[in-house]
Image: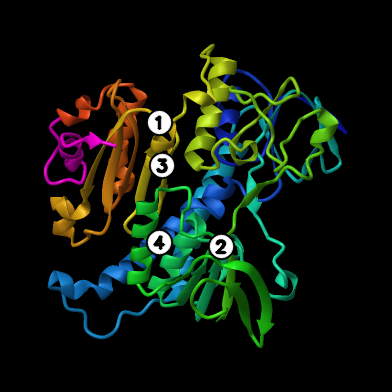
Amino acid sequence: MMTHFDAVIIGAGQAGPSLAGRLTQSGRKVAMIERKLFGGTCVNTGCTPTKTMIASAYAAHLARRSSDYGVTISGPVAVDFKAVKARKDEVAGKSRNSVESWLRGMANCTVYNGHASLHSAREVRVGSEVLTTDQIFLNVGGRAVVPDFPGVNQVQYLTNTSLLDLDTLPRHLVIIGGSYVGIEFGQMFRRFGSEVTIIEKGSRLVQHEDEDVSAAVKDILENEGIQIRLHAECIRLEPRGKDVAAGVNCTSGDPEVVGSHLLLAVGRRPNTDDLGLENAGVEVDTHGYVTVDDQLRTSAPGIWAMGDCNGKGAFTHTSYNDFEIVAANLLDNDPRRVSDRLPAYALYTDPPLGRVGLTEAAVRKSGKPALIGTRPMTKVGRAVEKGETQGFMKVLVDAGTKEILGAAILGVGGDEAIHCILDVMYAHAPYTTIQRAVHIHPTVSELIPTMLGDLKPL
């Protein structure tokens, strides 16, 4: 059976459904193909479920600290992990069902459940059907990398996806990988009551951040009783009864960590290896990411790639912006580009890290004259009042143009306050725009003008 569509979208993640909405509103006949769960990584195994669980972990942490606020709780704080999972499943399920219901009720949109493969640049097979089309949009996302550590096939391991299916709390969660996924899960499960060890091959956690950020994050985790093992070369795995043993060659500490559960959090890979991209002339790089230009067009005319599979961001907000770029160029005669986007993201530890633009290390490497400002969160009245003073804020400014080059806010509200800086950077306005602004007291954001008023040469 063969059916023609004006456009075929493969993958119902963050970019796909919104693009389907715009295309159908423009009068196009659209096919949406999803082989598993609607909503993509964010809704099902990323932001929505993990941040829901982080909220539960924060509630447990705050309850244990209740006496710091003059509040008495009789008896020890207990976590009902099955209830935590049920809450997470309900929140994620509502989001997933909302996306699916929207698509199935969308005029001029036909939803297909199944695996899609390209037969040519104008033909897509799904199940027993072949869909012909004028345009194809790839939005297939990514998945966790399973590294080829010695013994990895002899032990039971978890990824960010399967970990969310647990309904019993791990006694001791061993995490391999000291970046965002590993750190967020590590703090979360420690607050739920698990013993947690994080193993990282490198010399520090979140290595793409500045050293002062890495050190502060490490202190935050260790203060909560999380064991950190750095310089972990030659990682090897083996079963130890019902437990899992991770052997490591570290500069200090025991040569082996034994835990009840093992989480592999060492990176992501794109879901491009079974799409038949070669049949359509779609090029990928050495890591499997679809090669795209500044407007997300692939090497094959009439085919675009959005979201995690193009290697241009791997965040929900960048995936949604990919949709905006494609729709603006196709439908609005608005030549938006990926290169207009500033790198911005957050690490959802408690306290969170908000990041935008260049790191201090990158600015120093550039050699351009720059200014730097810093403030510890102990100087932020709002943080003191909330009893959450861990962390600091830092900003880098071009000494010539006075434009902000980058910033990091590691502290309570840092994931929100960073947008004060982000918006001014998009406006290409000088830092004095914020410095002279009158911010509301008491907030975290009010210390940003103060920090900018005390810049020093880098």
Q: Is residue 91 visible?
A: no
Q: Which residue is mark 3?
A: 361
Compared with 12, 202 (above or below) is below
- Frontmost of labels 4 and 1 is 1
- Frontmost of labels 2 and 4 is 2
Q: Report the span colored magenta.
A: 437-458
- Does residue 352 appear to the left or right of 263 in the view shown? left
Q: Which residue is mark 1?
A: 367
Q: Earlier in the sequence, mark 3 or mark 4?
A: 4
Kindly indicate the quadrant of the structure image that contains residue 365.
top left
Q: Earlier in the sequence, mark 3 or mark 1?
A: 3
The residues tagged by marks 2 and 1 sit, at their Cα atoms, a distance apart of 30 Å
Q: Which residue is mark 4?
A: 54
For disc 3, the neighbor class at 10 Å (few under 14, some 14 to 19, many from 20) is: few
Locate residue 448, reporting x and y percent.
Answer: 21, 39
Locate residue 278, reporting x and y percent.
Answer: 83, 34
Q: Which residue is mark 2?
A: 201
The residues tagged by marks 3 and 4 sit, at their Cα atoms, a distance apart of 30 Å
Compared with 169, 50 (above or below) is above
- Frontmost of labels 2 and 1 is 1
Please name the amino acid that badge 4 sits on. Answer: Ile
Labels 2 and 4 touching (C-beta < 8 A): no
Locate residue 355, reporting x and y percent.
Answer: 38, 42
- Frontmost of labels 3 and 1 is 1
